[in-house]
Image (cartoon, rainbow, N blue to C red):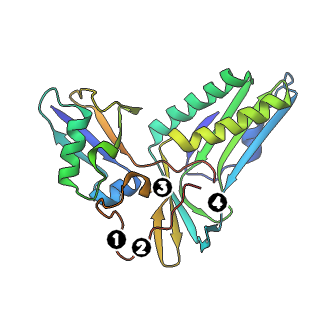
Amino acid sequence: MRVNVRFFAAFREFAGHDNLDVVLDPGSTVHDLRIRLHDQFPRLPQPERIVVAVNAEYADPDLALADNDEVALIPPVSGGSS
Amino acid sequence: MIQVTRQAINPDAVTETVLDPANGGVVTFLGTTRNHTSDRAVVSLEYEAYEEMAYKELERIAQEAQVNFGVRTVSIVHRFGHLDIGDISLVVAVGSAHRKEAFAAAQYTVDRIKETVPIWKKEVFEDGEVWVGIDACYAEGDQEPHSSSVSAHSHAG
């Protein structure tokens, strides 16, 4: 299966990509993908420290991904007001 | 009214969306970009948003504020893109039958936005730039996230 990974803010700069198609084994979880991406882009944080959203909702690490999911890596948020 | 926008925000227009004869109080909060962080001068800011998800999270927070505090309407507009110092980055307007709930709901909304909404702020200095909060996902001894020319002076704000 194939998922589209979106990178934002600091993670976009660390990975050098806005988005990337990633082919995964069926049954792969969010955590499997985090490990894969950290291996590919070592400047990303340790896998367990990467917050992930799937289809624009925060996702648990053990969530099984599905074909065509949109997966976003979410750096620490810093909007709002100081 | 919920919006995530590149356009300059008109706070009066946001306030108008919560004006209603049934309200006894309206609180409008403006978040503006500050010219310093700690003791370091900030030249400008770059906000980046995951627009679709930010919109959903803002909607969720507005609904939570309405339910938790019993206010009538909550409008939120968050800007992204390049902002100069003193620009308005956030407007929250709350319309309520009573003022106490309006203040509480506005406070809650502004606080929650910083916790869950996927919008990121980069502070640009004379001699570098920092994504605010990025250090939080690196432990001591992890891979250094910053390029060597940029020192980490970020804080959670």
Give the residue type at disc 1: Ser
Say left or right for A74 vs A82: left
Circles 2 and 4, Cβ within 8 Å, touching? The answer is no
- The tag earlier along the polypeptide, 2 or 4, is 4
Q: Residues within 10 Å of mark 2 (few under 14, many from 20)?
A: few
Specify the subunit that label 1 lies on: B
Q: Residues within 10 Å of mark 3 (few under 14, many from 20)?
A: many
- The tag earlier along the polypeptide, 2 or 3, is 3
- The tag earlier along the polypeptide, 4 or 3, is 4
Residue drawn 64% across the image and 66% down it:
B85
Q: Residue furthest front?
A: B140
Q: Secondary structure under badge 3?
A: loop
Which quadrant is the N terminus of chain B positioned in?
top right
Q: Residues within 10 Å of mark 1 (few under 14, many from 20)?
A: few
User: Disc number at residue B133?
Assistant: 3
Give the residue type at disc 3: Gly
Give the residue type at disc 2: Val
Q: Secondary structure under badge 2?
A: loop
Q: Is residue B155 visible?
A: yes
Give whichever of A77, B87 is nearer the camera. Answer: A77
Residue that carries the numbered disc 2 in the rendered image = B150
- The tag earlier along the polypeptide, 1 or 3, is 3
Circles 1 and 2, Cβ within 8 Å, touching? The answer is yes
Residue drawn 27% across the image and 56% down it:
A15
Residue that carries the numbered disc 1 in the rendered image = B147
Closer to the eye: label 2 or 4? 2
Q: Secondary structure under badge 4?
A: loop
Specify the subunit that label 3 lies on: B
Circles 2 and 3, Cβ within 8 Å, touching? The answer is no
